[in-house]
Image (cartoon, rainbow, N blue to C red):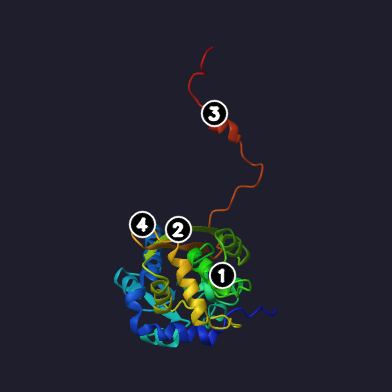
Amino acid sequence: MNVPRIFDPALRASRRDRAAATFQRHDFLYAAMAEELLERLGDVSRSFSRVLVIGCPDTRLRDYLSATGYGQVTCADPGALWAARAQGEQVSEDALPYEGGAFDLILCCGTLDTVNDLPGALIAMNRVLEPDGLLLVSFVGAGSLPRLRAALMAADGDRPAQRLHPQVDVRALGDLLARAGFAMPVADQQTLNVRYGSLFGLLGDLRGMGAAQCLASPPPPLTRAALVRAADHFAQEAEPDGRVTEKFVILHGSGWHPSATQPKPARRGSATVSLADALRPSGPKPTG
């Protein structure tokens, strides 16, 4: 099946590599996703010994997992420089170069919003998990950057161009996990609000974290006049202290590679007690 080519993989990789030198100044979004992944992993009672980490602008996830007894940790990233720095390899999530069942845990942090074949990426990750292996993912989703979107539309006037990536929402992520064959799929979201003194501070953060647009058919660059219009529109959203609150919506997903040992949902209609009876108070009935 031919998948529409929304993103340019080479441009995607170069954006990440260019951000490597100054990433630590702009890593708040990655830090929030990594922290949440580890917190959710901490709630899982089983142990893991063969871990794949996808999304490695630094070694914080690998170092934490290695230090806390997670065994062998393999790093991978869409950017060649980031992958090399983490002693890993450059990969595309929808064409992972690993054997089936090679890992019992995958953490994918901050990359799936710019992969061309998101369903294929989830299928690929399920393939390289062993039975009862766990996938945890976090990435930016729909509803993010509303102030920036509005500013760019104002800059383009009557003929707005697509300047930001298309994004999936939390419901779509849950559906995609199920379609990819994961057992017990779960998807939810959190909101991270960040305040900026100007549009250029936000754009600087996006470039610094390697998140600038990498569309396969990029729009024409903004003219100087259009950029001024965008900045003015963004500034109109400022609060009394002169700062604008921008929103990042982070999607979190999890799923297990199917295994015969996993609990199965009960057959429909097999319950011996109705939901209405279960929710009915058990104490004495009130008297009129």
The reply to whether residue 280 is visible in this rendering is: yes
Q: What residue lies at 53% left-to-right and 66% top-to-bottom?
A: 150
Evaluate whether residue 273 shows in this view. no
Q: Are marks 4 and 3 in contact (CB under 8 Å)?
A: no
| Tag nearer the camera, 3 or 1 | 1
Viewer-side residue, 102 vs 233: 233
Label whose residue precedes the other's in the sequence (3 or 1): 1
- The residue carrying pointer 1 sits among few (fewer than 14), some (14 to 19) or many (20 or more) residues within 10 Å by Cα, namely some
The residue that mark 4 highlights is: 240
Residue at position x 46%, y 69% in the image: 232
Answer left or right for 53 relative to 286.
left
Find residue 121 and report its horizontal and vertical position in percent: 57, 74
Q: Is residue 53 above or below residue 245?
A: below
Q: Which residue does the numbered mark 1 point to in the structure image?
A: 153
Q: Toward the viewer: 128 or 37?
A: 37
Can you tell which quarter of the image residue 37 is in? bottom left
Residue 81, given in percent of the width and then of the height, sits at 41, 87
Report which residue position mark 2 lands on: 190
The residue wearing badge 3 is 280
